[in-house]
């Protein structure tokens, strides 16, 4: 499997991506509404990168099944560790079980000609366990990411996602993100739409 460092243009077999989606019941013992609070904290050295990788695979499995090869749907444990190391990784847990995550950095280095401000912050690996969709956890992690980026000194946040993921793009646009261009990563099989949002100093978006 390719790493983030390579970002090479290559054919990504869908079957190989689907094979990486963990179909076991491990890490899935809890459900919303159990009464246990969801705690958000920074990723600790003793936390399992393998479990984080499995969460990402589960969270992006629906995209993979639809033919959209998000890197998070098939990345290796080594890739996850590298991506976590590029910023601040935050995790959401319910009774110790991993149910959400996001990684942020500000400013965030991007390739030359990437259509976003060079001093913008960014977040990636925003993921929520499928059983927690619709609970507001994704919004909670998004607000956290925006606040951290603003606190780190960036006035804008720039992200990208599959232009084919219409519902996801709409979710971001309803939260103030505006398209500014497109980009093609070598580790995905789609064109990405680049989205930018202005941030309030020390807080989330305007």
Image (cartoon, rainbow, N blue to C red):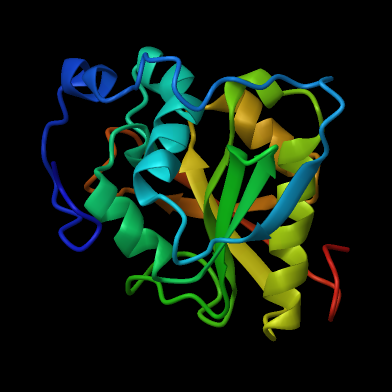
Residue at point 74% right, 76% down? 150
Q: Is residue 140 left or right of residue 158?
A: right
Q: Quadrant of the C terminus?
A: bottom right
Q: Quadrant of the N terminus?
A: top left
Q: Is residue 4 left or right of residue 167?
A: left
Q: Quadrant of residue 93?
A: top right
Q: Is residue 38 visible?
A: yes
- Residue 103 or 41: which is nearer the viewer? 41
Q: Is residue 198 visible?
A: no
Q: Quadrant of residue 204?
A: bottom right
**Tally of marks:** 0
As displayed, is residue 186 above or below residue 150?
above
Q: Is residue 175 left or right of residue 57?
A: right
As displayed, is residue 189 above or below residue 102?
above
- Residue 33 or 85: which is nearer the viewer? 33
Residue at point 57% right, 65% down? 104
As displayed, is residue 179 above or below residue 128?
below
- Residue 89 or 138: which is nearer the viewer? 89
Residue at point 66% right, 22% down? 30
């Amino acid at each position: 499997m390719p790493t983030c460092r390579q970002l090479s243009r290559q054919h990504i077999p869908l079957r190989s991506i689907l094979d990486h989606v963990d179909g076991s019941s491990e890490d899935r013992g809890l459900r919303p509404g159990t009464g246990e609070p969801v705690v958000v904290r920074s990723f600790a050295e003793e936390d399992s990168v393998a479990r984080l990788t499995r969460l990402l695979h589960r969270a992006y499995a629906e995209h993979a099944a639809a033919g959209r090869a998000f890197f998070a749907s098939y990345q290796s444990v080594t890739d996850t560790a590298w991506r976590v190391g590029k910023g601040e990784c935050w995790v959401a847990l319910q009774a110790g079980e991993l149910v959400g995550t996001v990684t942020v950095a500000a400013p965030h280095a991007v390739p030359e000609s990437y259509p976003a401000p060079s001093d913008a912050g960014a977040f990636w690996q925003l993921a929520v366990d499928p059983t927690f969709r619709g609970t507001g956890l994704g919004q909670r992690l998004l607000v956290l990411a925006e606040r951290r980026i603003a606190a780190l000194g960036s006035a804008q946040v720039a992200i990208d996602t599959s232009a084919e993921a219409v519902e996801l793009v709409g979710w971001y646009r309803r939260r103030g993100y505006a398209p500014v261009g497109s980009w093609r990563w070598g580790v995905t099989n789609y064109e990405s739409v680049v989205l930018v949002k202005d941030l309030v100093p020390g807080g989330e978006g305007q």
